[in-house]
Image: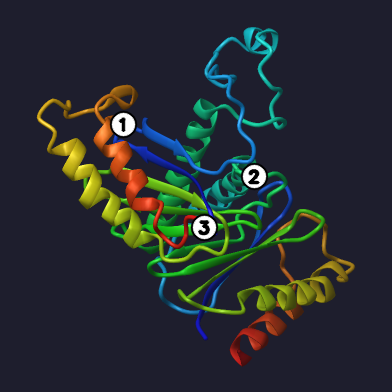
Amino acid sequence: MVVYSLYILNKAAGLIYQRDFNEGLRKLSSNDYLVLSGTFHAVHAIASRISPVPSSSGIEVLETETFRLQCFQTLTGTKFLLISEPRQQGSDAILRRIYELYADYVIKNPFYQIEMPVRCDLFDRHLGAYIKSL
Amino acid sequence: MTIYSFWIFDRHCECIYHKDFKRPMRQLRPTSALSSTDPKQRNTSGGPPKGSGPLTVDDESKLVFGVVFSLRNMVKKLSGDQESFFSFKTTKYKLHFFETQTNLRFVMVTDTRVDGVRPILEQIYAGLYVEYVVKNPLSPPEHPGGEGVNNELFTLGLDRFLRPLSIFE
């Protein structure tokens, strides 16, 4: 199971967390990551608008030749994007587990300011351990 | 399984062919709410307010192109210039994408259970588009407004090709 990277976007399309776990994708500058998350946020919203049937969600899975991007949007509008190798199954469950970690170690951290970039040591450690255990 | 719609965009970012198959919601009025530049006019012309109501074909083609273009650029940035994406999926539909070397873009919107549409799009390009549009001596090299692509042979061929497929039900 190869997970390339994880992005967490707040509800205003700001990138609040970005971490690479494995090599495989290009390294980008931090500015490019911000542009990328902004683009995805917009495309996610438009994708639900162009749906041929009513009440569609935004993009959930994006499949390409080199990776598979899974998006999980929480009820509060935070988006978790997981980039893994193509034909990877079960990314959805991984994202839900990461959301639990986020709730436990970021949201419940009294020093964390909501909607701001995540700098929580415990979250980093638990996330790293969880991804390694996959 | 269902095919909802099919689109072709040329390298000038213009929609040169569009066909709806089984669309539950579609406004038939051909006027566009997005294209009128004057915001006052947009409101008085009776166009649907942003974010509600079904889209017109014109508006939808712009949004579909915007989505595939942005995603394609995003994927190129992440994984190299040669890469492109196959498809994306939401809870209600799946959009398949194929881009040729000449920047023609083929888009097919289906329901979520459909898989492996890439070869079908390639066949539409190689077997139908090249055969009936590119090789047509009367067809212009560029197709502003869909001129040349919207010919009978191509439309018939597309219909005949898609209807027997298992994804078309």
Chain letter, disc 1 residue: B
| In the rendered image, residues at marks 1 and 3 fall on the same chain | yes
Q: Type of residue at label 2?
A: Ala
> Disc 2 designates what residue?
A45
Quarter occupied by residue B17: top left
The residue nearer to you, when weighing A113 against A99, is A99
- Give the answer, above or below, for where A131 lies relative to A108: below
Point out the tag, 1 or 3, that comes first from the N-terminus. Answer: 1
> Disc 1 designates what residue?
B12
- Mark 1 is surrounded, within 10 Å at the Cα level, by few (under 14), some (14 to 19) or many (20 or more) other residues, namely few
Residue B118 on image: x %, y %: 36, 60
Q: Name the residue rendered at 38%, 52% in the picture.
A: B162
The residue nearer to you, when weighing B67 against A84, is B67
Q: CA distance from mark 1 to mark 2?
A: 24 Å
Q: Tell me, yes or no, whether the two marked residues, 1 and 2, touch with CB atoms within 8 Å.
A: no
- Mark 3 is surrounded, within 10 Å at the Cα level, by few (under 14), some (14 to 19) or many (20 or more) other residues, namely many
> Disc 3 designates what residue?
B88
Q: Name the residue rendered at 47%, 66% in the picture.
A: B115
Q: CA distance from mark 2 to mark 3?
A: 13 Å
| In the rendered image, residues at marks 1 and 2 fall on the same chain | no
Chain letter, disc 3 residue: B
